[in-house]
Amino acid sequence: QSFLKVYQTAKEDRMSFLKSTNRSLKHHLLVTLRPVRVVNGEAHHGKLNFVDLAGNEDGKKGGSQSKNLDTNCISHSLQSLGSVLHALNSHAAQIPYKETKITQLLQDSMNPSSSVMVMTCIAPHPKFYQDTHNSLCYANKARGSAKTGNDSQ
């Protein structure tokens, strides 16, 4: 219940900011919780990231220059996140965490020893087939990056 309050507050703050700056509603949302559990006087710290990724819209549909810029930024950050996931899946020596803000913020959480759970929103209508396919492929990439470090997941 506490998470829902934090998430709702973050969502409302984001909406207020976007309305006041006349920006698109299509942005990523990252909520980080840092729970602490004390066992026998010893504090154990955790970190939970809840990431709501904006969808990758088709920039060819038209719109204002600022919306096209937003679409390009979203597309770039999703591609960058995909590159990080690919690098993790292929056990690459270099992981491109520094490319975007979202990958920098998630760097300590995206490694083979992390636990990752992915929820994907999909639409069953044939009109959304390509978006659904892309979302499922992306989720599969994320799932694969978590499994590389611990095959028992």
Image (spheres, rainbow, N blue to C red):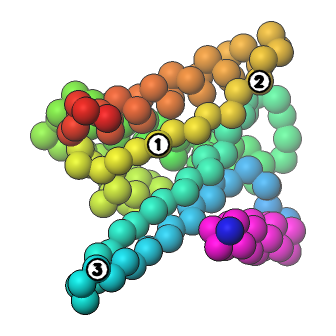
Circle 2 packing at 10 Å, graded few (<14), some (14-19), many (20+), is: few
Mark 2 residue element: loop
- List the residue tagged with mark 1: 117
Amino acid found under the numbered disc labelled 1? Met
Quarter assignment of residue 125: top right
* Residue 150: image location, x then y, percent: 22, 37
Residue at numbered disc 2: 123
Q: Report the quarter where the N terminus lies.
A: bottom right
Quadrant for residue 87, please give it.
Answer: top left
C-alpha distance separating marks 2 and 3 = 44 Å
Q: Is residue 17 magenta?
A: yes
Q: Are marks 1 and 2 in contact (CB under 8 Å)?
A: no
Q: CA distance from mark 1 to mark 3?
A: 26 Å
Q: Secondary structure at mark 1?
A: loop
Q: Is residue 69 something that shows in the picture? A: no
Mark 2 or mark 1, which is nearer the start of the sequence?
1
Q: Which residues are magenta?
A: 2-20
| Residue type at numbered disc 3 | Val
Comparing labels 1 and 2, the label whose residue is closer to the camera: 1
Q: Is residue 9 magenta?
A: yes
Q: Name the residue beneath numbered marker 3.
A: 39
Cβ atoms at labels 2 and 3 below 8 Å apart: no
Please tell me how crowded label 1 is: few (under 14), some (14-19), or many (20+) other residues with Cα within 10 Å.
Answer: few
